[in-house]
Amino acid sequence: MRILIKGAAVVRRPGEGVTPAADVVVEGARFSGVFPPGEAQGEFDKVIEAEGKLLVPGFVNAHTHLAMTLFRGLAEDLALKDWLEKKIWPAERKLTGEIVYWFSLLGLVEMIRTGTTAFADMYFFMEEVGRAVEEAGLRALLSYGVIAPTPERVEPELKAAEKFAREWNGAAGGRIRTALSPHAPYTCGPEVWREAVHLAKELKIPLHTHIAETKEEVESHRERHGKSPVQWLEELGAFAVSTIAAHCVWVSEKDIDILAAHNVSVAHCPSSNLKLASGIAPAWAMLQGGVNLAIGTDGAASNNTLDMVREMRLAAILAKAKAGDSRAMPAPEALKSATQRGATALGWAKDLGAIEEGYLADCVLFDLDAVHFTPGHDPLADLVYTASGADVEMVMVGGEILMEGRNLLTLDEEKILARCRELARKFR
Amino acid sequence: MRILIKGAAVVRRPGEGVTPAADVVVEGARFSGVFPPGEAQGEFDKVIEAEGKLLVPGFVNAHTHLAMTLFRGLAEDLALKDWLEKKIWPAERKLTGEIVYWFSLLGLVEMIRTGTTAFADMYFFMEEVGRAVEEAGLRALLSYGVIAPTPERVEPELKAAEKFAREWNGAAGGRIRTALSPHAPYTCGPEVWREAVHLAKELKIPLHTHIAETKEEVESHRERHGKSPVQWLEELGAFAVSTIAAHCVWVSEKDIDILAAHNVSVAHCPSSNLKLASGIAPAWAMLQGGVNLAIGTDGAASNNTLDMVREMRLAAILAKAKAGDSRAMPAPEALKSATQRGATALGWAKDLGAIEEGYLADCVLFDLDAVHFTPGHDPLADLVYTASGADVEMVMVGGEILMEGRNLLTLDEEKILARCRELARKFR
């Protein structure tokens, strides 16, 4: 299959501006070249007319819990403790594989519609999430969330995590990779972390966890262990393997140095952190300190969308207020965090995050012919500060078109929405 | 003209939940009744089928500068001082009536598309803004922005403001009202404020100004006057007339008490305050303190959209982090600020902000049949935390339909976009 994406303005490498018009050629799963308009040679099985549109590397959602789309709007405006203990955790105990499968599909529909091509997901019934990802055509780093607050939970939880990680790594023609996910320092003790690190080394896969989401969590960790969660994990050797650390809202300068020194990727989730009143992560300080800062939506229970384009905007403007400097997190840096740095976080650093010869063909096309993109002085600023996922009209992953002209090609949206509404009625 | 909006879920009064299904009747410019499905009697000139959709009072943008759509993306990621002094102010000196007219139309297209039915605008060449509003069909409180940093500017500026305020108050069949706008305490001295208050009393119109946007502004005001801008304005008697105070990022508890005691409406502009690194206004503290907290987008130079639905979401989640409490600014309160409290701010308290018999028929219809509104446990939470302006499909102002099925009925969108692109090319 040879595809020509014709005449679009192209963000070839996020952070390096916009090429005003180019012809992009896709052969099989990869880009085979970016040419001046009209100069791409040979025959094409398909031509996508893209004049006046903007082609961007696919967005990477570095932290989510896909099937939590079930809980969107279920438990609003509560105190965090009540939200978790009275609503979310009891509801999660009633989950089934069937529910996780359908609500993962729902999340995948939303991700495709808003331009996400790859994501990191940590949840339960992960085989069902894997099946859904296989059908949808996205790229994903999947992991079973290990929660082992008591000693007797340690072995069964680790077993479940290991089983999924071994069986699904490399699935869907390599689109699915796996990780190990001790849920957090406060839900998993040292033995879980050590065993997870050991396994991650053996399987050559990363860790994906939550760190320093709330002030209370960090304070109580310091009381019990005499050090921050980041320092504690470093000393346990957790950062000896590649790690995605979601949140990192309450990190010190010393923590930031540790994260940077060990190449830990942070999945910054600004909507969720604001909505749950967790706080505002020092995103710009982390980037300035050399941390690979990616962006995530977190689950739809606390966002309540999976729209990475809107999340990128929020990350960009929130970073300025947090840093007290309107020059902080400029548009190119925000775009880089939402795409290329996310690809690095997920372990696809060499293959994803650019529209250049040899890279995997994961990309999205924005329709710029809309009032909010007018007059169009600066397409990159418009993309970061003005766009939303609703402006995405074409999505491609590994050379396969998942959405074209806003029509989904791999999933039956109507059926998925209907089935999810029915399941949600029963669940309530 | 008698219109039936049939079968929608209806937010009759923001803050009081959702009626699952109702028939809403519009006669002329006003709602004439809200009935159980199927019980509206009589003949209708038009029926809008709205089963499965959500009808909400129109959004009110309490602070913007419409024609700044020209500057969207023109001057990004700069320090605030450079942004204003090197980019925005020099650019504003090159404005013409023609530019203001066309870019106001552009802003109006964007507002209609995203569900705004009324707004407060302060700018220059206001006759041109008035013409544009007249054509578009929206409702607006318009004012000429008085900037008089030197004594010789006082008289001509006040004359211009008075002329516009007198001539346009009540225009467009009452859809346009006027205000007086000393730009800010730091750009207008006491004589301007006193004269503006005097005139506002005579004309029975409100003031619309900027207060306490940046920390530097408040600190330098305290140094020069020994009190905060809010206290200074109170002592000058400014709050003796109805006032919209944009921003109020840096207000003390005492300031909040003063704003509440004088029924000052605050136009909270969270996107602009974040993007310009001004800070985070204590929105929930103001609401809890009894302030009429409305929401505004500010101009497109610092937002960069005019989407009130997205602004409402940001206000709601940001308030929680600022207050350190995830229960702060719950969904019904955010919706109230984005609609009814905005109507109060603009001076339409008795006529706007509810879908009830006798109220002016300003309303918008959301299409809920979308993946991000599924499964739909709580339509109000979905509206506040999930929706964006792109989900609006019908907009009505005073019984006149401005958009239906996402098609604009009063404005020629294609022509406006083309003209604005051409003018922007010349402007650069």
Image (cartoon, coloured by chain):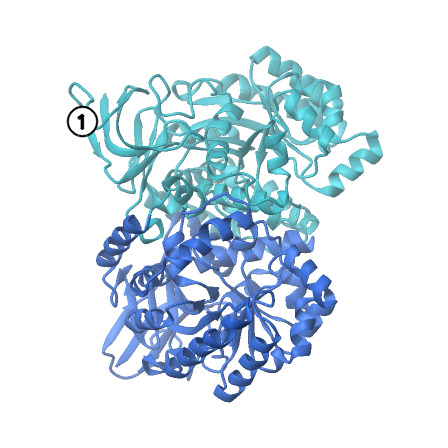
Chain colours: A cyan, B blue
In the displayed structure image, the side of residue A237 where residue A331 appears, left or right: left
**Which residue extends farthest top?**
A202
> Which quarter of the figure has residue B300?
bottom left
Q: x and y percent of residue B373 in the render? A: 43, 52
Q: Secondary structure at mark 1?
A: loop
How many labels, in total? 1
> Which quarter of the figure has residue B108?
bottom left
Q: x and y percent of residue A368 in the render? A: 31, 44
In the displayed structure image, the side of residue A241 where residue B180 appears, left or right: left
Decide: is B139 above or below B314: below
B82 or A139, nearer to the observer: B82
According to the image, label 1 marks what residue? A38
A125 or A48, nearer to the observer: A48
Q: x and y percent of residue B186 in the render? A: 60, 65
**Which residue extends farthest left?**
A43
In the displayed structure image, the side of residue B147 where residue B396 appears, left or right: left
Decide: is B288 above or below A389: below
In the displayed structure image, the side of residue B33 where residue A263 appears, left or right: right
Q: Residue at x 55, y 56 (%)?
A: B270
**Residue B6 visible (yes or no):** no
Q: Residue at x 66, y 17 (%)?
A: A197
**Residue B132 visible (yes or no):** yes
- The answer for which chain carries disc 1 is A
B223 or A136, nearer to the observer: B223
Q: x and y percent of residue A16 in the render? A: 42, 29
Decide: is B151 above or below B318: below
10 Å neighbourhood of mark 1: few (<14), some, or many (≥20)? few
Q: Residue at x 53, y 16 (%)?
A: A166
- Which residue type carries mark 1? Gly
Question: Which quadrant is home to the N terminus of chain A?
Answer: top left
**Which residue extends farthest front?**
B152
